[in-house]
Image: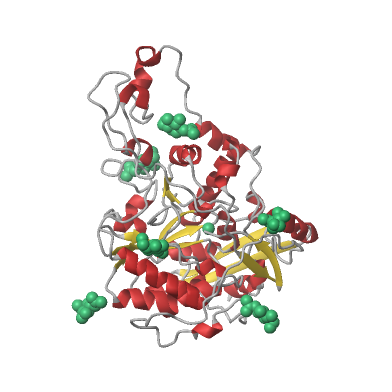
Amino acid sequence: MLAGSIFILSLAGLPVYGQSSASSASAASSTTSSSSVSTTSGVSASSGTTSVSVTGSGTTSAVGISGSGTTTSNVTKTEATALTFTLAVTNPTAVPLASITANETSLATIPLPSTATPATSIVAANYPPMDKVPPTDSSEVQAWIAEVQATPTVAGGCPANLQAAQDTSRCWWYCTGCVRDTDVQECPDKGTWGLTYDDGPSYYTPNLLTYLSANDLHATFFTVGSRCLQFPATLQEEFMAGHQVAVHTWSHPYLTTLSNEEIIAELGWTKKIMKDVTGVTPNMFRPPYGDIDDRVRNISIAMGLTPVMWTRMSATATFDTDDFDVHGGLASSYGVLNNWENIIANASKIDTGFIVLEHDLFEESVQLATGYILPSAMQQNFTIQPVVQCLNKPMTDAYIETNNNATNPPAASGAVTLSSGAPGSISTSPSKKNSGVSLKISGTSSALALSGVFAIIALFL
Ligand SMILES: *[C@@H]1O[C@H](CO)[C@@H](O)[C@H](O)[C@H]1NC(C)=O
Ligand SMILES: *[C@@H]1O[C@H](CO)[C@@H](O)[C@H](O)[C@H]1NC(C)=O
Ligand SMILES: *[C@@H]1O[C@H](CO)[C@@H](O)[C@H](O)[C@H]1NC(C)=O
Ligand SMILES: *[C@@H]1O[C@H](CO)[C@@H](O)[C@H](O)[C@H]1NC(C)=O
Ligand SMILES: *[C@@H]1O[C@H](CO)[C@@H](O)[C@H](O)[C@H]1NC(C)=O
Ligand SMILES: *[C@@H]1O[C@H](CO)[C@@H](O)[C@H](O)[C@H]1NC(C)=O
Ligand SMILES: [Zn+2]
């Protein structure tokens, strides 16, 4: 049972995300840099035994755990201690809500239902260190940078740049009136829930996959490249089971704080390992914390990745269950379900479908999803689908290689509209739907308790 050697790593092997993570990660990695992780997972596929090997030195060990980081945030959160509503239904085998806490015991993990051979042998030494912004001087990153260097235009405006002006993939507003409307923030059809889970794969992703499978549900997994390196077989199972897999960066940084080159490294490496494991390259991406601006958006689109956010009611209210914060003790299981109830109430008021922020990194979030949120949602008859399908597109359109470029052109050219005409004319197209959106990250924080140390405070989205 190959998986065993992966799963015996303690939960503390998961990363710290948050404002103080740099210091705690570096502290931890300095103590683990000489360790070597060699994990072999051979698995029985129907056609025989295949193996997934993950080898490397010093890069797959726990990063950012046992951090000696100090808590510096002044944010306080109030934890709910009871539900304020009655759930329609729960899973009979649900873990009791009172037990889904930051202090809960780490339960045994379960094996994946199936695995197969990765498209490429996954060797940790062939990737950057996990959970750190990758260096930008590698040949891979340099090549990805070259991919997105748009040819500059020359002085003289549209007449001097006729070819560029006619290049719809450039979407040059000044000459064509082209606008972009590329962000996905909801599903078009009312009653439809674009189900997403971020930050995995993790030790408890198999529990979620098993529940989804048993209930014939499919989701979009926005996976972290470092977690794909740590759990390649789980990423592969997500793909094989018919879920959509999509990009959530290599080390989970606030992307707007990074240089162009670093953003490219974050997205490029994640695309690469996902392709190496599954054989296909995702074309959707969720920015960690929802931290995206036009610079990040432009780079992601140039790299073939459409940004997928989650539904927003106002500048301060988004469809965030806050499930991520139960593990760190900053939210309670009751609070998460109360948030869910508010989300559902709001979802019934909007005339589109919706997308909710949830995570599969920690066992508490998975327990809440499988024990309560999903049973409740099914009882309420939502149409639950991966994001690509809630957009009324086939699953094949979720990947660059299998995307139907004729009917589902890549984002860079897909949102192009041409004005009636003259160079410099003002577009009459509506402004893009996310203009003016303010990010939710300022001020709020969350904590992760890792190895018993409350180390990090930062709102996790
Ligand atoms: C916490 O509050 C103190 C006193 O108001 C302030 O000096 C400090 O900068 C605050 N720390 C953070 C992380 O906001
Ligand atoms: C993003 O791309 C648009 C369209 O090409 C361009 O107008 C805008 O200046 C770019 N923004 C940034 C920050 O690169
Ligand atoms: C975890 O357990 C400790 C010791 O029993 C307790 O002080 C702390 O409040 C608990 N934390 C949470 C988030 O329940
Ligand atoms: C739901 O909508 C109400 C009213 O607009 C708002 O106050 C609340 O913050 C929203 N909650 C969520 C989770 O969207
Ligand atoms: C869901 O659908 C079932 C079967 O059609 C129906 O009996 C039930 O009342 C519906 N529930 C809700 C909340 O609409
Ligand atoms: C769509 O374009 C991509 C990128 O050029 C290509 O790899 C892929 O094969 C194309 N899809 C189809 C169905 O031809
Ligand atoms: Zn995330």
Q: Is residue 43 left or right of residue 302?
A: right
Q: Give the residue at the far bottom of this rendering.
A: 92
**Residue 442 horizontal/vertical position (percent):** 56, 52
**Residue 448 horizontal/vertical position (percent):** 63, 67
- Which quadrant would residue 264 be assigned to in this image? top right
The quadrant in which the N terminus is found is bottom right
Q: Is residue 132 left or right of residue 167?
A: right
Name the residue nearer the viewer: 117 or 136.
136
Q: Is residue 50 visible?
A: no
**Residue 326 horizontal/vertical position (percent):** 56, 72
- Residue at 58% x, 51% y is 250
**Residue 443 horizontal/vertical position (percent):** 58, 55
- Residue at 28% x, 59% y is 350
- Residue at 50% x, 53% y is 440
- Which quadrant would residue 52 be assigned to in this image? bottom right
Rendered view: 411 above or below 453: above
Looking at the image, what colour scheme do you see?
secondary structure
- Which quadrant would residue 37 be assigned to in this image? bottom right
Name the residue nearer the viewer: 455 or 195.
455
Q: How many marks?
A: 0
Q: Is residue 74 visible?
A: yes
Rendered view: 287 above or below 372: above
Rendered view: 355 above or below 154: below
Name the residue nearer the viewer: 362 or 353.
353
